[in-house]
Image: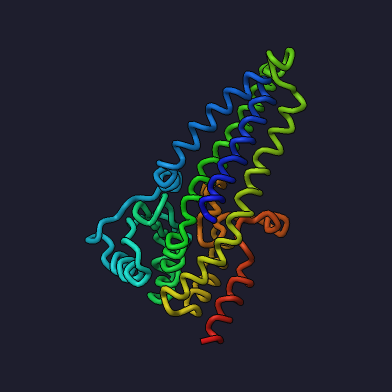
């Protein structure tokens, strides 16, 4: 199922690239965009984790610098039947975390410095177990590719702006793009990329919550962590590239009620309700 999702994602974003290329430079632009998209898909498959970690200023920490964090990750990975992922830290007071990589053998978990100060050990175990749940469910490749490609789509929309400003829309279809199509591309492409991310991310968060609760053994601790993280991220939003926001355990970006409609994360209240139902069922 995840393999199908990955190929569907690649196809959808490739189509967006081609439409954008046609809007900016006609049929020749579409061909160039196709070549670029294929190259980006290949690059994203092998390097999306490195790009995602770099975009979030994450640095790998050895066991001697964060022994407790490494012990927790190693213990949880053993329980989950997974290889121990690499461990990264993001220097940010806002508490949050994400996982990335193309498969369990090439995975990494990243936490902010703020999360280690805010959460108690059991809550931190719940968060890290959630991230290992993503790895166990093999959906980290999907989120990593989505982050890279969504960022590229936004860049393409910016290129459409410049193409329109400098007359890239003049001429016939074979010689230049359509100015109206370029305007539509500037608006629709980033929105379409966000909707693709939203559709993929919302369902996988519920599954990772369930897997994380089973790995840690304490669904109520993960529920408590989610409540704390949501509260703090609303109060102190992180400065992150919007394309990578869907990778985090809770939405790191500020936004009002309208923004919530297009959030890549399901409602925290519903996630907590489901976790507490698991507690009641024990």
The picture places residue 204, in percent across and down from the top left corner, at 55, 61
Does residue 188 appear to the left or right of 32 in the view shown? right
Q: Say whether residue 239 is visible.
A: no
Q: Residue at x 73, y 30 (%)?
A: 183
Q: Quadrant of the rendered structure where residue 34 is?
A: top right
Residue 168 picture quarter = top right
**Residue 156 rendering spot, x and y as whole percentages:** 60, 31
185 or 215: nearer the viewer = 215
Q: Is residue 205 visible?
A: yes
Task: Specify the farthest residue to the left.
Answer: 64
Identify whether 263 is placed above or below 120: above
| Left or right of 34 on screen, residue 111 | left
Decide which of 245, 42 is in the foreground and name it.
Answer: 42
In the displayed structure, 46 sits above or below 3; it is above
Q: Furthest-right residue in view? A: 180
Q: How is the image coloured?
A: rainbow
């Amino acid at each position: 199922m995840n393999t199908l999702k990955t190929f569907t994602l690649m196809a959808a974003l490739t189509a967006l690239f081609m439409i954008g290329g046609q809007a900016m430079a006609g049929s020749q632009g579409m061909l160039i965009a196709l070549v670029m998209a294929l190259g980006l898909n290949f690059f994203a498959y092998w390097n999306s984790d490195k790009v995602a970690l770099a975009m979030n200023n994450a640095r790998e920490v050895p066991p001697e610098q964060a022994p407790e964090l490494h012990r927790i990750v190693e213990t949880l990975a053993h329980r989950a039947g997974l290889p121990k992922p690499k461990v990264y830290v993001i220097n940010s007071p806002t508490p949050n975390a994400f996982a990335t990589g193309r498969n369990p053998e090439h995975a990494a978990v990243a936490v902010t410095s703020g999360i280690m100060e805010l959460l108690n050990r059991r809550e931190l175990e719940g968060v890290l177990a959630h991230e290992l749940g993503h790895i166990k469910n093999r959906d980290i490749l999907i989120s990593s590719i989505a982050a890279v490609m969504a960022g590229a789509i936004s860049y393409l929309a910016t290129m459409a702006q410049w193409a329109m400003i400098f007359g890239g829309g003049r001429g016939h279809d074979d010689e230049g793009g359509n100015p109206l199509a370029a305007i539509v591309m500037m608006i629709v492409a980033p929105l379409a990329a966000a909707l693709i991310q939203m559709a993929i991310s919302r369902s996988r968060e519920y599954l990772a919550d369930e897997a994380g609760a089973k790995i840690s053994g304490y669904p109520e601790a993960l529920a408590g962590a989610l409540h704390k993280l949501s509260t703090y991220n609303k109060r102190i939003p992180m400065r992150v590239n919007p394309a990578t926001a869907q990778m985090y355990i809770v939405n790191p970006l500020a936004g009002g009620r309208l923004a919530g409609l297009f959030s890549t994360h399901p409602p925290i209240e519903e996630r907590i309700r489901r976790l507490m139902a698991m507690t009641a069922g024990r």
